[in-house]
Image: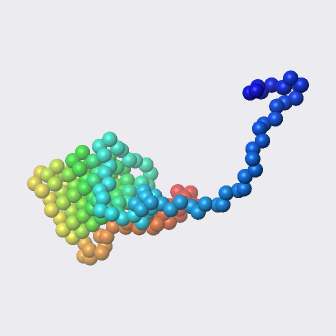
């Protein structure tokens, strides 16, 4: 009954016939549920965390957070966000640009924000451009400090499409 070889008369068995079915109508693409992780316009007041077990590195890496970003791991790249907190075990090698930045860990690179706070455990090597700066006793800082004349100069670029355009231009130019 289920043999693959030739039948007793030497012919190959025929596959069972299937009943004819009418084609199903084309289904409309499924709508993404609200809050889909693939919806770039999804807002919210959440916190993103780069945990202690993560190291993010590569050429021309840029991390953009529309809300609060806590970095407890290591990032070799640039950070743009509304509020960035670099935890005691966190480190960034690159530029950090946000509306408000709190440093408890390490930064090697420029810091640009309206409000910058260096906590006692902070270790910063780089220049800070700010409107308001607080440096706690015990914080280590090696660099220059400059107060921005206009707070608008410090606004982080949170527009992902702008970065996509820059990235595509770099790819087409062979960079």
Residue at (12%, 51%) from the top-left corner?
Answer: 138
Left or right: where does residue 97 sit relative to residue 39? left
Residue at (81%, 35%) from the top-left corner?
Answer: 14
Residue 111, image quadrant: bottom left
x, y (%) of residue 59?
Answer: 44, 51
Q: Quadrant of the N terminus?
A: top right
Residue at (25%, 72%) from the top-left corner?
Answer: 148
x, y (%) of residue 168?
Answer: 53, 62
Above or below, 160 against 105 in this view is: below
Residue at (14%, 52%) from the top-left corner?
Answer: 120
Residue 54, image quadrant: top left
| Residue 109 visible somewhere in the drawing | no
**Nearer-the-camera pick, 153 or 44:** 44
Find the residue positioned furthest to the left. 137
Left or right: where does residue 63 sit relative to residue 8? left
x, y (%) of residue 143?
Answer: 23, 58
x, y (%) of residue 16?
Answer: 77, 38
**Nearer-the-camera pick, 123 or 55:** 55
């Amino acid at each position: 009954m289920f043999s693959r070889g030739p039948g007793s008369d030497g012919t190959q068995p025929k596959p069972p016939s299937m009943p004819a079915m009418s084609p199903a109508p084309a289904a409309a693409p499924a709508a993404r549920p609200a809050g889909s992780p693939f919806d770039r316009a999804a807002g919210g007041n959440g916190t993103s965390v780069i945990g202690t077990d993560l190291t993010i590195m590569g050429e021309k890496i840029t991390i953009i957070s529309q809300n609060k970003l806590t970095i407890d791991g290591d990032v070799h790249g640039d950070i743009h966000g509304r509020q960035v907190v670099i935890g005691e075990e966190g480190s960034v090698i690159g530029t950090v640009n946000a509306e408000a930045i709190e440093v408890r860990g390490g930064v090697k690179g420029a810091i640009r924000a309206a409000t910058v706070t260096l906590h006692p455990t902070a270790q910063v090597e780089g220049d800070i451009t700010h409107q308001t700066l607080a440096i706690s006793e015990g914080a280590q800082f090696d660099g220059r400090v400059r107060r921005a004349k206009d707070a608008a100069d410090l606004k982080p670029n949170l527009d992902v499409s702008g970065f996509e355009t820059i990235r595509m231009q770099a790819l087409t130019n062979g960079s």
